[in-house]
Amino acid sequence: MNTHQKMLEVANQALRQAVEQLRFDPHKPALHAHAPANWLNDPNGLVYFNGEYHLFYQHNPFAPEHWGSGRIHWGHMKSKDLVHWEHLPIALAPSEDYDRDGCFSGGAAVQDGKLYLFYTSNIFTVPPGLPDDLLQQQCVAVSEDGIHFEKSELNPLIKHPPAGIGQDNHFRDPNVFFHDGTWYMLVGNRLGDNGKILLYRSDDLLRWEYVKVFGESSGDMGYMWECPDFFSLNGKDVLAFSPQGIGWPDQPNISGYYLGRLDYETLNFSHGEFYKLDHGFDFYAPQSFTDGKGRRILFGWMRMPRNAEKQWAGSMTLPRELRVTGNRLTIHPVEELTLLRQQQITVSDVRLRQDNRTTYPGIKGTCIELLCTFDLTNTDAAEFGLELRSSLDGDQKTVVTYSKEHNTITLDRNQSGDYVSGTRVLEMQRRAEKLELHIFLDTCMMEMFINYGEYVMSGWLFPDPGNEEIAFFSRGGSTTIKSVDCWGLKL
Ligand code: FRU
């Protein structure tokens, strides 16, 4: 057994113990992919390999928290359909001098039937705990069976960003893609308060040559760019990334994308403006991949509020399919999620009268899918919306409000239960004749796809387990509901 295999044994053993000690927790997600126990953050190494979906993730098998020396491993699960996941042994453990304090985020590549995992090796250069005293380098581990990974003797493959271009204490999250016989790697980086992404090139996935700065903040787009994710879709090129310091006061780090065109002659990426990938709470560090059907599928990390961490912490989002529509991405729940549907209840063509709050028999639950279409041409209400996971007395609820005047959607979780609070207001750019809200609820999470994937708003909610009412309301006029479909969801 080499050192890596020994460290994996220790980690897998700790995780097995943590799973045995798990107490029932009504808030643990029932439908979302998450770690068997303890800590999870970013999705890593997403890949469709030998006919199966592999989802790796940042994982601390020892505790429901992130920081600490040698804690961050790569957890691993796989699936045939993106919704039923099988946990596999931990794939990467800190085991060498160069990665002794963590195997940080990265991506996958497949060459000659082998699966390559690129990751950032993390070292604290002084005693642990001071996040800025890091040395971060780019490494690889290779597998033939997609389960057991061997770290390359050539590690670290990339030791430093070029002097004067980037800092080597914040140099992470390699993302590898292939074009016309050449491999490319993007790495997140910063110089002072200027976030950037560096581009490297290779013929063999092992020897990497620095090419150029692929993108950078230039002062107004954040001090550090994490988790680059580059791909082509429908003739467009997309750079998704997670800039730090430009989000909301309660969540300064956000995730979004530029859509544009990469000129492979000059390696210039020209693009339009930055769009957020999620307008709700907690979503961060997404990664995407192309599957066997040519779909681009994205998972994000749902970061749990600190004080909500229990014997587990963090979850993936549901799998989301990305499509290009004009100069934007639209984001859709993958069709396999329909496999989870149980009984269906439908209500159609109802009119909610002014200042009415209504529930419909059977439309309620903790793990449900709700597809609601409102007819805006037949609605004169100033605002209308839904209360999710409401108590019977309405004291606890998560409120989604559409304002007709402002064409905004507000997600309010000030009464959503423990740990969470705040509102998010989404200003929609286009006025439509219909408003479609496609909502997935899972014990303590919500994801809302708006107007056929134009926007998504997600967040953690921690209502009391028994609070499962769904109420519709209309204020300052009446609202026409075209239809509401509600399915119970079960794995
Ligand atoms: C994003 C991130 C990455 C890093 C990883 C460490 O959430 O900070 O930049 O590699 O998490 O777990």
Image (cartoon, grey):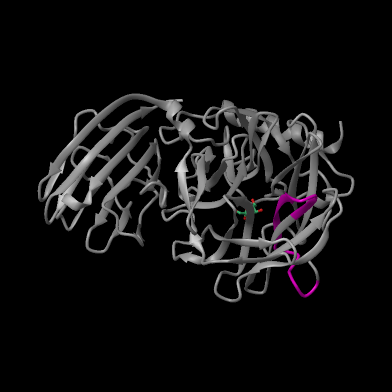
472 above or below 137?
above
- Residue 278, image x, y percentages: 46, 53
Query: Residue at the top extreme?
Result: 343
In depth, the one of 271 and 340 nearer the eye is 271
Tell me if residue 159 can be seen: no
Residue at point 60% right, 71% down?
Answer: 217
In depth, the one of 353 and 326 nearer the eye is 326
Relative placement, left or right, of 154 versus 406 is right
Relative placement, left or right, of 145 versus 435 is right
In depth, the one of 258 and 170 nearer the eye is 258
Is 176 within the magenta?
yes
Relative placement, left or right, of 135 versus 323 is right
- Residue 453, image x, y percentages: 42, 48
Residue at point 42% right, 36% down?
Answer: 27
Tell me if residue 116 can be seen: yes
Residue at point 80% right, 39% down?
Answer: 142
- Residue 60, image x, y percentages: 64, 42
The N terminus: image quadrant = top right
Is 76 within the magenta?
no
Number of numbered callouts drawn: 0
**Over which residues does the magenta segment extend?**
163-184
Relative placement, left or right, of 468 versus 141 is left
Residue at point 84% right, 53% down?
Answer: 157
- Residue 231, image x, y percentages: 63, 52
